[in-house]
Amino acid sequence: MAPRPLIAGNWKMNMDLAGSEALAKDLLGAVGAAAKFEMTVCPPAPYLAAVLGVLEGSMISVGGQDCHQNASGAHTGDVSAAMLADLGCAYVIVGHSERRADHAESDAVVLAKAEAARANDLIPIVCVGETEAERDAGRTLDVVGTQIRGSVPEGLTGETLVVAYEPVWAIGTGRTPTTDDVAAVHAHIRSVLAEKTGDAANVRLLYGGSVKPANATELMAVNNVNGALVGGASLKAGDFLAIARST
């Protein structure tokens, strides 16, 4: 049996306090215990407490968009995994391509962040994906495999790890790979994960990169796709819920 789908909303550096609370309330009113998918939202750090307050006790969990690899210290502007856990978060995104590019995060740094997440009982959503140049050079599987080997801690399970494949060239561009391409990459990810864990079959593999209601049903039907990491479309309750219901 395939793992229960996870639909994760990455709000990135968007929204304000009122809008964050309103969006959380809209989702809260539409997602009940009977949902066949799991949903989590990842607001900007300043709004985490407010969104957690709205969603407390509901079927929708909350996650951070990043965490520091250290438990504490002189790291101005950073947020530790312990802080996220203290607030009540369940997940944290690590290794998003925007972090890898904008902050020069290496696989080793992403690995350390994922380990910090697990040390604080958070589930890391480890992101991997190739650039357009890497794709054009036919290096997609090599790049993604290397990122998995370098970014995913040893010995995690389907209950303690999520992996998201987000081709960098598809994020926010409106472009998506073919379903055959997605199937090939997700199958490769599952295969490489078997080197890191004996529970690779149960690790949820999310697709991300210009996911929207118009293409969600097709993407969610691809073998080894167990949900989505959604960016822009997660900022509109109707679009985000339509994607979730396509699983």
Image (cartoon, rainbow, N blue to C red):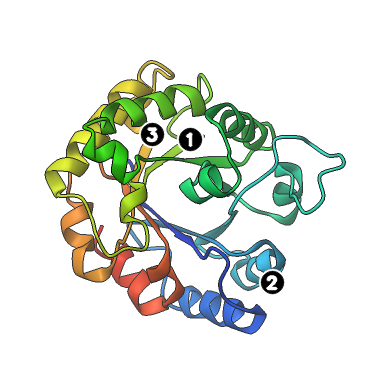
The first of marks 2 and 1 along the sequence is 2
Q: CA distance from mark 2 to mark 1?
A: 26 Å
Residue under pointer 1? 161
Q: Secondary structure at mark 2?
A: helix
Q: Position of residue 201 (x, y in %)?
A: 31, 28
Left or right of 231, for residue 19: right
Q: Position of residue 110 (x, y in %)?
A: 57, 34
Residue under pointer 3? 203
The first of marks 2 and 3 along the sequence is 2
Q: How many dots with numbers? A: 3
Residue under pointer 2? 50
The residue located at (23%, 55%) in the rendering is 176
Q: Position of residue 60 (x, y in %)?
A: 51, 62
Q: Which mark is residue 216?
A: none
- In the image, residue 197 sits, relative to residue 224, either above or below, namely above
The residue located at (50%, 19%) in the rendering is 155
The residue type indicated by label 3 comes to: Val
